[in-house]
Image: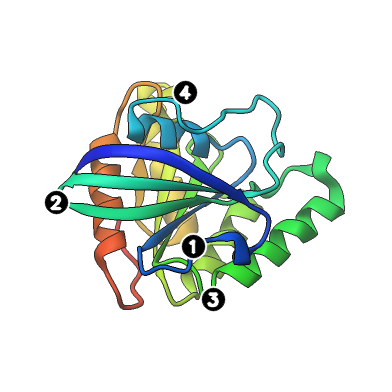
């Protein structure tokens, strides 16, 4: 898949602020500071998403319009606030839960769970995947920051992730570009499907 352009559309505090057109939506879900914004920038090959050094900074849904050149296709990427960071407290967790529960039953065509390759089996990630996998949308898992692991540890980390989630996991790096082309192709497949399905990250 060749990405022609990615542009920021708006930040949304509620699902009523999101587009109501027929363009497919891909939701990005993950812990705070897992690297979702960096992945968006890597896919776009330019800086369209603001990267914060402070986990839990983003409290809105950030909407991006992604135009694919080959094959010709348009989709929205909806970057949800991160979960699992204690500094935001109970209020932030309730905000995420409320937003997610309002959005997912009616919003995305597909959802991509982004996990940190270095931390297999975190309880919050397992809970997020269990919840996502039960929803009526396509789902897949991506392990970010694979470049942070020594090569000798990468295979073992992915095996642990796949075992704990009972699902295929695609390893990617926004820094080195590893796995990005596979991620682009995965996104294209997810966005093109119309029936509930759990997608393999291959």
Quadrant of the image occupied by residue 199: bottom left
Dot label at residue 19: 1
At 51% from the left and 75% from the top, the residue drawn is 106
At 30% from the left and 44% from the top, the residue drawn is 183
Residue 6's place in the image compared with 140, above or below, is above
The answer to the question of whether label 2 and label 1 lie on touching residues, with beta carbons closer than 8 A, is: no
Tell me the residue that label 2 is attached to.
71
Query: Tag 1's secondary structure?
Result: loop
Tell me the residue that label 3 is attached to.
105
Q: Is 12 positioned to the left or the right of 92 in the image?
A: left
Q: Choose the circle earlier in sequence order: 4 or 3.
A: 3
Kindly report which numbered mark, 4 or 2, lies closer to the viewer in this rendering: 2
Which of the two residues, 78 or 146, is positioned nearer the viewer here? Answer: 78
Q: Choose the circle earlier in sequence order: 4 or 2.
A: 2
Cα–Cα gap, marks 4 and 2: 32 Å
The answer to whether residue 201 is seen in the rendering is no
Tell me the residue that label 4 is attached to.
148
């Amino acid at each position: 898949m060749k990405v022609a352009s990615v542009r920021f559309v708006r930040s949304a505090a509620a699902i009523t602020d999101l587009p109501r057109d027929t363009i497919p939506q891909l939701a990005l879900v993950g812990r705070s500071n897992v690297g979702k914004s960096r992945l968006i920038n890597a896919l776009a090959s330019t800086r369209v998403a603001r990267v914060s050094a402070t986990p839990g900074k983003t409290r809105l849904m950030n909407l991006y319009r992604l135009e694919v050149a080959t094959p010709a296709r348009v989709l929205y990427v909806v970057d949800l606030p991160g979960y699992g960071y204690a500094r935001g407290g109970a209020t932030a967790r309730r905000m995420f839960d409320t937003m997610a529960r309002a959005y997912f039953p009616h919003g995305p065509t597909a959802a991509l769970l982004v996990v940190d390759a270095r931390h297999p089996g975190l309880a919050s990630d397992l809970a997020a995947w269990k919840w996502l996998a039960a929803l009526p949308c396509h789902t897949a898992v991506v392990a970010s920051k694979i470049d942070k692991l020594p090569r000798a540890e990468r295979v073992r980390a992915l095996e642990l992730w796949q075992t704990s989630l009972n699902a295929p996991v695609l390893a990617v790096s926004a820094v080195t570009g590893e796995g990005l082309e596979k991620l682009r192709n995965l996104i294209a497949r997810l966005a093109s499907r119309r029936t509930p399905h759990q997608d393999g990250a291959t």
